[in-house]
Image (tube, rainbow, N blue to C red):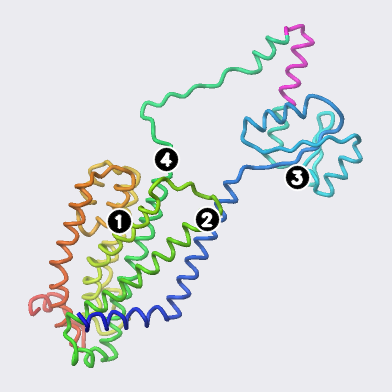
């Protein structure tokens, strides 16, 4: 294990200092914080300042419409038209209303225009009905109908949407990390093979130690980056109030990190094999294509499972090791997977990984020392 730890430390330290890693981490965190901050700005309650010239019932009616529509409205009264228009020009208010006319600086805010229009229509209807001799109580009853009641046949927990959003972000993060760090394993293997460094390394350590050390070091780096990004996103959302995390949100982050380790352990050996059978970086894309298709397919199945976590597809995919890391977390978050199903999925994934790593190590040991491209069938047979 000392050799494995030494190789893992070498992989972690070298790659964490790599400019590509630093830049990609900084860009990801910046984009995530920007998205969270932008979402917080868009989700804020709209607010307007409205001026009203003279006395009258319009101000009170606009306030009522704003309160019912969830809009913050500050109404200010002005004694003269000149003073009101000066307030509009200076930006003190967004608009001024006088005698059925709205005065704005350039273009009226659509939401504010709708509020004032509804208020003036209500006042106009009341005035017409009052002049027609209708009793004021009947006017209010006619213009204030009871709210429409909604009865859902299949009611959903209001927090379910929040949990689904958190699960979707987790799926997206898992997909990106599994794909990126699997590629790093494959690229590292083919780089050492092309430069003949692997021959020097294998003179002092066994192939299994080299491969497992490389997988461990890169996997810890991926876990570190994922935890860093998750922490930054959580902090940004908490500080801006953009998201109201459901209870157990920190446990969800822990769940995503745990399934990253399981998924990475399963896929890293396959990516190492993909890198060991080609002599150059230019040839790596061809051998990685089947793995890329598999992970992309698991990603789309994970999205579908997030929409229908109780379906047959989600149930089967959450137990199938190649797709389980991208499907089971969302089912657990959404409460559609029993504890025994989660434990069974973990057990199946660990079992598949334990069976796969020795085969991957044998193929890696045979293929990584070959100078040219190695056929996978030949490497499997000889391994």
**Residue at 49%, 65% in the rendered image:** 29
Whether the magenta-drawn stretch holds residue 127 is answered as yes
The quarter of the displayed image where residue 125 is located? top right
- As drawn, the label of residue 36 is 2
The image shows residue 80, relative to residue 119, as above or below, that is below
How far apart, in angstroms, are the residues tagged by discs 1 and 3?
Answer: 48 Å
Image quadrant where one finds the C terminus: bottom left
- The range drawn in magenta is 120-135
Which residue is at the front of the view, 91 or 125?
91
Q: Which mark is residue 159?
A: 4
Can you tell which mark lies on residue 96?
Answer: none
Quadrant where the N terminus sits is bottom left
Residue 93 position in % (x across, y down)? 79, 43
Labels 2 & 4 near each other (Cβ < 8 A): no
Q: Is residue 205 left or right of residue 126?
A: left
Mark 1–mark 2 distance (CA, rounded to whole Å): 23 Å
Residue 107: which numbered mark, if any?
A: 3
């Amino acid at each position: 294990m000392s050799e494995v730890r030494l190789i893992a430390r070498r992989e972690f330290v070298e790659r964490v200092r790599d400019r590509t890693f630093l830049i990609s981490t900084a860009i990801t965190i910046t984009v995530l914080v920007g998205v969270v901050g932008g979402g917080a700005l868009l989700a804020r309650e709209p607010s307007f300042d409205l001026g009203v010239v003279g006395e009258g019932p319009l101000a009170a009616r606009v306030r009522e419409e704003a309160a019912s529509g969830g809009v913050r409205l500050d109404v200010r009264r002005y004694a003269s038209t000149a003073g009101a228009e000066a307030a509009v020009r200076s930006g003190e208010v967004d608009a001024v209303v006088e005698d059925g006319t709205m005065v704005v600086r350039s273009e009226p805010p659509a939401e504010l225009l709708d509020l004032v229009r509804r208020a003036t229509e209500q006042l106009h209807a009341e005035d017409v009905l009052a002049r027609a001799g209708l009793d004021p109580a009947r006017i209010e009853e006619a213009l204030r109908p009871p709210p429409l009641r909604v009865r859902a046949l299949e009611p959903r927990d209001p927090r379910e949407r929040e949990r689904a959003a958190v699960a979707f972000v987790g799926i997206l993060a898992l997909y990106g990390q599994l794909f990126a760090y699997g590629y790093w394993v494959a690229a590292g293997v083919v780089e050492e093979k092309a430069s003949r460094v692997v021959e020097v390394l294998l003179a002092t350590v066994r192939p299994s130690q080299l491969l497992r050390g490389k997988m461990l070091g890169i996997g810890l780096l991926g876990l570190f980056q994922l935890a860093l990004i998750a922490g930054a996103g959580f902090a940004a959302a908490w500080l801006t109030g953009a998201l109201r995390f459901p209870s157990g949100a920190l446990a969800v982050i822990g769940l995503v990190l745990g399934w990253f380790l399981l998924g990475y352990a399963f896929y890293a050996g396959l990516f190492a094999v993909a890198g060991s059978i080609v002599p150059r970086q230019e040839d790596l894309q061809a051998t990685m294509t089947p793995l890329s298709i598999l992970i992309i397919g698991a990603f789309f199945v994970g999205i579908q499972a997030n929409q229908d976590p109780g379906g047959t597809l989600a149930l089967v995919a959450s137990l199938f090791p190649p797709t389980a890391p991208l499907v089971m977390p969302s089912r657990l978050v959404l409460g559609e997977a029993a504890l025994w199903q989660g434990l069974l999925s973990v057990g199946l994934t660990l079992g598949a990984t334990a069976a796969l790593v020795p085969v991957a190590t044998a193929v890696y040991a045979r293929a990584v020392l070959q100078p040219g491209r190695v056929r996978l069938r030949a490497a499997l047979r000889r391994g």
